[in-house]
Amino acid sequence: MRMRILGFSLFLLVFTGCKSDFERIRLSGDTTRIYNKAIELYDRGEYQKSQTLFELIINNFRGQKEAEDLYFKYAYTHFHLKNYILAAYYFNNFSTTYSLSTLKEEADFMAAFSNYRMSPQYRLEQSYTQKAIDGLQDFVNAYPRSERVPECNQLIDGLRAKLEKKAFAEAKLYYDLRQYQAALHTFENLLKDFPETRDAELVRYLMVDAAYAWAKNSVVDKQTERYEKTLEFARLFRVKYPNSQFIEELARTESETRKALNTI
């Protein structure tokens, strides 16, 4: 029992001593000591503590040779601590302030990558996704020979797939809620924005079905135009997918559409 108490006391002594050492340096007002300790903590991966110390001295190093490296590491502390908004901000600031730095390329990439890390799941608002795509594309354009270009293209593809998934989910929701005009509009925008989508066949079939339902539920004055639009969508579908799994359903919709037009 006494050994356990002694062991715990020793642990507290060591822990308190380390903490006191950090606090003594933090409160010392000695720029050199604070700088050296901040770099030491950063190299050890203690980013919260190193960030705290960087913030005490960062303005003191303006115009000095250490400023560039210090500011770059400070931006990285935000990234490592998952403060991605601030990371993107400080990496962008670094790129602007040190435009001739050999670290500018990495800073530009990390600014875009920080926005990438803020991209949420597809059902949520996607402004950071679009911001990340724009930033990564700007990087590719600015550094076409960079070794990071393949990674950027891969990240962009993933982000665009997320936007595509969101667009399909929104259009399908309109369809399921029987808001057929909104569904058609959203499906058309999806095909315009993502012409290579793997869901194109399903999207075009749902457009035929939505167009038919919209026409059927329209006032009489609008029905002829909207039924004809249904047949137009159906003809386009047949041209693109002559062997589609939806051909039988499509034929039934076409038949019902022609009957409706004849009745009108």
Image (cartoon, rainbow, N blue to C red):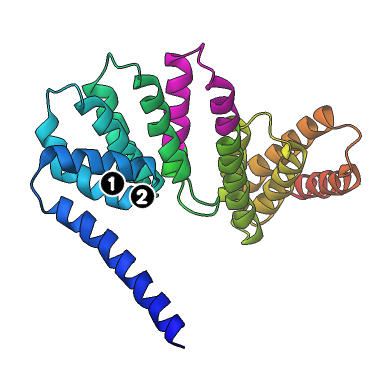
Q: Which residue is depicted at the point 81% across and 44% down?
A: 258
The reply to whether residue 89 is in sight is no
**Mark 2 crowd level (few <14, some 14–19, many ≥20, 10 Å Cα):** some
- The numbered mark at residue 46 is 2
Secondary-structure class at tag 1? helix
Instruction: In this rendered view, identify the residue nearer to me: 57 or 222.
Output: 57
Secondary-structure class at tag 2? loop
Q: Are marks 1 and 2 in contact (CB under 8 Å)?
A: yes
**Amino acid at the residue labelled 1:** Ser
Instruction: In this rendered view, identify the residue nearer to me: 115 or 222.
Output: 115
Left or right: 218 with respect to 248? left
- The numbered mark at residue 253 is none
The reply to whether residue 64 is in sight is yes
The stretch in magenta equals: 130-156
**Amino acid at the residue labelled 2:** Glu
Q: Is residue 192 magenta?
A: no
Picture mark count: 2
Q: Point out residue 113 in the picture as x, y percentages from the top left corner.
A: 45, 35
Residue under numbered circle 1: 50
